[in-house]
Image (tube, rainbow, N blue to C red):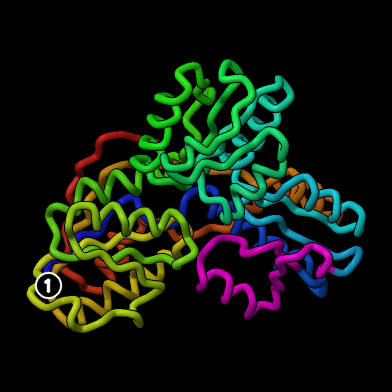
Amino acid sequence: MKLILANPRGFCAGVYMAIDVVNQLLSIARGQSIYVHHEIVHNRHVVDRFRQQNVQFVDDITEVPHDSIVVFSAHGVSPFIRQQALERNLVAIDATCPLVTKVHAEAIRYARKGYQILLIGHTSHQEVIGTRGEAPDAIQVVESPDDVPNLIIKDPEKLVYLTQTTLSRDDASRIISALKDAFPRIKDPPSDDICYATTNRQSAVSALTPQCDLVLVVGSSNSSNSQRLTEIAQAFDKPAKLIDDASELVDNWFDGVETVLITAGASAPEDLVKDLIVELITRFGGEVELHDIHHESVEFGLPGTLKEFMREQGIDPTGRRISMDTAAAIESWLTQQNVPHKVIDLTVGKT
């Protein structure tokens, strides 16, 4: 069996940063309880591994005891949550992805200018909830083109749309087209809100799916970007399965399958991909082809709130980044595991 491994896949810079924040706190705040508001990222394994280290995840900030440490997840929070943390005298460490923070800033800026904001995204997603909280009276959420006729518009001359960062680019484009048809004067955001990592992973799946008989997406079911990768593969009329890990494989998925595409959502750890490769090679034999579609070099530094906390503890934050495995390291790992493999460079851009 041939296994085509998409690159890029897995952790994006925002996820690396958010996980790094919790790891840093575990190493420097010994003896102190660490709380995270919602899941730090949408991946079951990441959350469970932190729970095993006594990190506590809460859905309500009032569950965090006064004077404790709380981390805001990568998806961001509303000003109301920040105020609650302040009132409880919490040490609030902000692990919000900078690309999400950018959308928050855009919402604040346009609301102050008197614009109505049409936020394209999923109403129940934590990122959308947080962004909407920045200007609740100015924002309406648009989940599909069917929502457009029901929007309440005061002045079509003062409209702008923003998007959730983890959307399918194709889905977002359809909604944007519907909005522009209905409101020709609607304003585009200053820059694309869908993040580079989401775009690159979707582009890789679109480019590689036609070559495959089955697509396996490593990621959790509550991960928006992982779900979008699965849907993109299915749009090519190819079977695609979203799995948390190799234990969820089903034997009859592989009947008549000669080529499998493997990718991973932006919050899925690389070791889960490695375990999946080992399982498939053990069962079916074959080789791995590493297909490079985009090269990513984006990296986010530690957030200022964490640096400030470190300095208060007498710790210099310089050089404190925790090294993490990257998708680029897979080739050396395959060599160590004696797995037949080759690299195919199809790079179309760098990010």
Where residue 255 sits: x, y (%)? 11, 78
Is residue 57 rendered magenta in the image?
yes
Asked if residue 133 is positioned above or below residue 118 in the image, the reply reads: below
Which residue is labeled 1 in the image? 286
- Res 73 → quadrant: bottom right
Give the side of residue 301 with respect to residue 327, left or right: right
In this view of the protein, which residue sits in the foreground, 328 or 118?
A: 118
At horizontal 21% and vertical 73% (from top left) the residue drawn is 338
Q: Quadrant of residue 16?
A: bottom right
Q: Quadrant of the C terminus?
A: top left
Rendered image quadrant of residue 27: bottom right
Nearest the viewer among 53 and 116 is 116
- Span shown in magenta: 35-64
Q: Is residue 261 left or right of residue 40?
A: left
Residue at position x 45%, y 60% in the image: 325
In the image, what residue type sits under mark 1? Answer: Gly
Identify which residue, 339 or 150, lies in the foreground: 150
Q: Is residue 15 above or below residue 337?
A: above
Front residue of 4/207: it is 207
Q: Position of residue 224 (x, y in %)?
A: 46, 56
Q: Position of residue 64 (x, y in %)?
A: 82, 68
Residue drawn at 66 percent across, 51 percent down: 95
Residue 189's spot in the image, x, y percent? 53, 26
